[in-house]
Amino acid sequence: GSGIAPIRSAIESGQLGVSAPGQGGRTARLYYGVRNVGDTPYANKFLEWEERGVEVVPVVSQPGEEWDGRSGYVQNALEEDGVPIPRNSGALMCGVNGMTDAV
C-alpha cells in the first residue's frame, strides 16, 4: 500500500492525459494491490480518481469474508484482464520486485 503515494501524485497532477468516463480519449486503469482491506491507503480517493478518468481495480491478496472484489495479486489480475492494445499502452509501477518483474 505504501507504493501508492507516487502513483497518487501522478493521478492528481493531471499530467496523465486521461479523460473522464464517457468523454472519449485516453483511458487508465489502476490495479491497486493490498494485503487486506484494512491496508488500503487513499481508499477515500477512489471516486475522485475515477472521476479523473482512472478506473480503480482494488486487488486484495488476503481477503476476509467481507471482501467481494478481486483477490490475489495485481499481476494476475492484469493478466486475466489483458491489455487490449499493448503498443499503445504505458505502465506506472511501484511495488515489490516480484510484482514489477511479473508485470
Image (cartoon, rainbow, N blue to C red):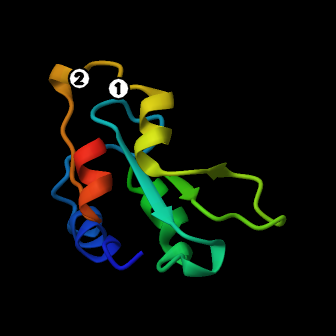
Q: Which residue is mark 2?
A: 86
Query: Eyeballing the image, is 31 above or below 21?
Result: below
5 with respect to 76 (left or right)? left
Secondary element at image label 2: helix
Q: Nearer the viewer, residue 46 or 3?
A: 3
Q: Is residue 54 visible?
A: no
- Quarter-wise, where is residue 9 in the image? bottom left
Give the percent coordinates (x, y) of residue 57. 52, 50
Q: Which residue is mark 1?
A: 83
99 with respect to 21 (left or right)? left
Q: Nearer the viewer, residue 11 or 73?
A: 73
Secondary element at image label 1: loop
Looking at the picture, which amino acid does disc 2 mark?
A: Pro
10 Å neighbourhood of mark 2: few (<14), some, or many (≥20)? few
Determine whether label 1 and label 2 are within 8 Å by CB.
Answer: yes
Give the percent coordinates (x, y) of residue 7. 27, 66
73 with respect to 30 (left or right)? right
75 with respect to 87 (left or right)? right
Looking at the picture, which amino acid does disc 1 mark?
A: Val
Give the percent coordinates (x, y) of residue 76. 47, 40
Q: Nearer the viewer, residue 56 or 26?
A: 56
Q: Quadrant of the C terminus?
A: top left
